[in-house]
Image: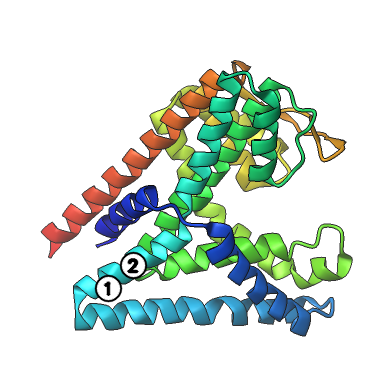
């Protein structure tokens, strides 16, 4: 059922893209603020309790509804799974933003490409060159494909029904919202949320990175993963970007000018500077990884049928 649910969710999302900011991010933000206002006193254990109360009840409820519907009518359970996946993935939104930036670069509309990239990433990109726009777009696409598709699918397979989708999406959101990079009190409160997401994303990130290597330049991807990933501040993101850059044969990272200041970043990857052509290659890499993911799920489904 997981394979069928995933395919149907992909189709529905392509036909009718979801407004993720309105229907997913906004409700999650209200939920996060509710628990933060009531539990945040700068103590780690209170942040841990807030995370458990915010995440576990929805995860258990979604899994319980799946089991109840499956016992009553499997077709209803399938519809429920597709609905949760539709809300939890958001792949179409990211792919459309990427395609719009690529089209703007190909037409020489650098200002428009900067504006689209800034809207997508949430940072002002008013001084980025065309190479920087392409480089940042590829980075964002690699990370977004992992967090909106591959990691979501992994947890849907691991946990019963779509409970894993809710677990991953909520853990990602709370880990980012409660990180408290400039607020020591919020940083203590969100310590558990950040560590919980790191733990939840540890294995999926490495599976996605390995998948990039398999469908791309395997030798360079593995080399970049081993030699360069540790340079990135966020280890999981470093692994994904290093493997993706090596698989594509492109240079990513490097300092960029964002929101009025220079952000220092290490160089990762091998090969040439990014451009619109490498953006097209990134699209191919991601879709080949999607096909590999579906193929593995199909083999697991067949193996389950044979075993039964």
| Residue 77 badge | 1
**Secondary-structure class at tag 1:** helix
Instruction: Give coordinates of residue 69: x percent, y percent.
Output: 27, 80
Residue 60 shows in this picture: yes
Q: Quadrant of residue 307?
A: bottom left
Report how many numbered discs are placed on residues in the image. Answer: 2
Instruction: Give coordinates of residue 95: x percent, y percent.
Output: 49, 40
- Residue 9 is left or right of residue 45, and the answer is left
Q: Quadrant of residue 176?
A: bottom right
- Residue 6 is left or right of residue 246, and the answer is left
Would you place residue 114 above or below residue 108 in this image?
below
Most foreground residue, 163 or 104? 104
| Residue 247 badge | none
Instruction: Give coordinates of residue 157: x percent, y percent.
Output: 36, 61
Residue sitting at 52 percent across and 44 percent down?
A: 94
Residue 249 shows in this picture: no
Residue sitting at 71 percent across and 63 percent down?
A: 177
Q: Quadrant of residue 293?
A: top left
| Residue 81 badge | 2
CB contact under 8 Å: marks 1 and 2 = yes
- Where is the C terminus found, in terms of image quarters? bottom left
Colour mode? Answer: rainbow
């Amino acid at each position: 059922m997981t394979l069928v649910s995933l395919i149907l969710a992909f189709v529905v999302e392509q036909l009718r893209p979801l407004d993720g900011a309105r229907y997913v991010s906004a409700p999650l933000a209200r939920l996060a603020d509710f628990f933060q206002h009531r539990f945040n006193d700068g103590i780690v254990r209170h942040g841990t309790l807030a995370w458990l109360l915010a995440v576990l009840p929805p995860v258990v409820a979604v899994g319980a509804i799946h089991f109840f519907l499956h016992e009553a009518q499997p077709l209803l359970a399938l519809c429920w799974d597709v609905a949760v996946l539709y809300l939890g993935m958001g792949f179409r939104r990211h792919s459309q933003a990427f395609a719009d930036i690529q089209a703007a670069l190909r037409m020489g509309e650098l200002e428009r490409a900067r504006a689209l990239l800034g809207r997508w990433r949430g940072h002002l990109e008013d001084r980025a060159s065309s190479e920087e726009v392409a480089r940042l777009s590829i980075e964002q696409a690699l990370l977004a494909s992992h967090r909106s598709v591959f990691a979501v699918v992994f947890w849907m397979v691991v946990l019963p029904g779509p409970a894993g989708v809710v677990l991953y999406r909520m853990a990602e959101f709370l880990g980012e919202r409660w990180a408290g990079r400039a607020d020591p009190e919020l940083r203590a409160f969100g310590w558990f949320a950040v560590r919980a997401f790191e733990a939840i994303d540890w294995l999926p990130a490495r599976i996605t990175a390995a998948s990039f290597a398999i469908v791309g330049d395997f030798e360079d991807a593995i080399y970049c993963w081993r030699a360069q990933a540790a340079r990135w501040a966020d280890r999981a993101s470093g692994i994904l970007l290093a493997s993706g850059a090596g698989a594509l044969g492109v240079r990513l990272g490097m300092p960029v000018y964002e929101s009025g200041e220079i952000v220092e970043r290490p160089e990762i990857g091998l090969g040439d500077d990014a451009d619109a052509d490498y953006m097209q290659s990134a699209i191919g890499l991601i879709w080949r990884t999607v096909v590999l993911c579906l193929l593995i799920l199909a083999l697991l489904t067949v193996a389950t049928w044979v075993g039964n």
